[in-house]
Image: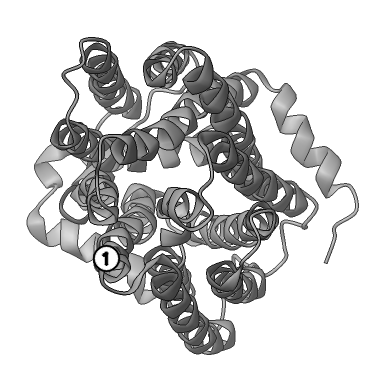
Amino acid sequence: MIHDGAFGKSLALLRTRRFGTFWFASLLSNIGTWAQQVAQPWLLLSLGASPFLLGLDAFAMGAPIFLLTLIGGAMADLIDRRRVIVFFQSIQMLCPMLLVVLIMTDHIQPWMVIVLSLVVGVTDALSMPSFQSIVPSIVQREQIPAGIALNSTQFNLSRILGPSLAGLLIVGVGMAGAFALNAASYLPFILVSLWVLPRSEPTQHDEEFTRHRFWAGIRDSVREPALRGALLTVFATSVLCAPLITFCPVLVKEVFAGSIEHFSLTMSAFGVGGLLGAVGLLAVGPARDRRPISSWLAVAYAITVVLAAQNHWPWGLPVLFVVAGVTMTASNASANTLLQSIAPVRLRGQTISLFMLAIRGGVSLGSLLTGLTVNVLGVREALFINGVLAVLAHLAIGYEWRRSPLPRSVV
């Protein structure tokens, strides 16, 4: 259901001082991130790393989510979120700077890249719940769906620009150029976080925060069937479908004998699809039930993974990645909107930490497991199995999720 005027009202958020500045700074930061996301696996392959090490690198970046993201969610509810974001983003900025030095001095080794990915994973796990809960804190409650959709547009726009810039930099100045771009992109976001983001008011005092309260908050967050269905949908997508992105360089280099330009084009195509999916959500009315959108598009994403695994034409890969970008973005963003709209303010940080656990932890686990199956069966076979399992999982999860009642606050 397209809501008249919803698109224009959504875009009006970009003209507000706080959200508009936050959106632009986030775009710059994510452009750098996606430039490195293209350069890093290509760097590993050029250093002789196996597909398993490629999966291990992705696992190292995501594994801390399992141990630390719930703590990060508690920090988002207890500590000024600006301080959390600035502190961990500053540490994270040092990682691409160190990679530039290692590449320029010709001391780079695969294990160094993986260790630095682990550092990034730790800082992400502790800071992302604070980052993700910023949008609801700078817009009105009825604007949350539009804010999340707009945030998704900048993320996916960066998925187009970042890989394109990475390809140009790698060809023009070498691998170090992409990592230098990422390091520089942190600074505007850190400054904007200090200037624009509101000082958060913790919903609980430190002395009141006990282990019992912590786990009670997690339990309350997943007790609601609508929230549980959203989390399961995102987790299944991340474990079974996200490896399509992780092992894209293996498809390009080993199956199609492609170059870095082909790889960056394919990743940019995914960003184009993601941007289309996010823009499409801007036209969906705020009262629309997001569960069917999220569930059925998750099924469509899984089918796309199956088709990509069976594709034998190099030009077909970017086309399928456009479809993958549309379906993944619209599905995950719809689930995220539902979560942030339903979650009580006192549990928002912890609810978002569960979302991050599902999406980032799922990607980490899926990358590791798929890396093992790629080594044994081959990349096409591994992705085909993933896609079939994902279709079955989403049909089962969606059947129960769509039948559960919604809270009165969500129509």
* Above or below for 163 versus 266: above
Residue 33 visible? The answer is: yes
* Mark 1 crowd level (few <14, some 14–19, many ≥20, 10 Å Cα): few
The colour scheme applied to this rendered structure is one colour
Numbered circles on residues, count: 1
Circle 1 is placed at which residue position? 375
The relative height of residue 82 versus residue 371 in the rendered view (above or below) is above
Residue at 14%, 47% in the rendered image:
209
Q: In the picture, residue 147 is in which quadrant?
A: top right
Q: Residue at x 23, y 36 (%)?
A: 117
User: How far across and how far down the image is residue 33, in percent?
Assistant: 44, 30
Work out whether residue 263 or residue 324 is closer to the camera in this orientation and state it.
263
Quadrant in the rendering for residue 52: bottom left
- Figure check: 50 above or below 308: above
Residue 347, image x, y percentages? 34, 53
Residue depicted at x 57% and y 73%: 310
**SS of the residue under disc 1:** helix
Q: Is residue 140 visible in the rendered structure shown here? A: no
- Quarter of the picture containing the C terminus is bottom right
Residue sitting nearer the eye, 106 or 342 = 106
User: Looking at the picture, which amino acid does disc 1 mark?
Assistant: Asn
- The location of residue 350, given as percent across then percent down, is 31, 53
Where 259 falls versus 106 (above or below)? below
The extreme front residue here reads: 257
Q: Residue furthest right?
A: 4
Does residue 319 appear left or right of residue 33 in this picture? right
- Picture quarter with the N terminus: bottom right
Q: Nearer the viewer, residue 223 or 204?
A: 223
Q: At 31% across and 23% down in the image, what residue appears?
A: 89
Q: Position of residue 228 (x, y in %)?
A: 41, 73
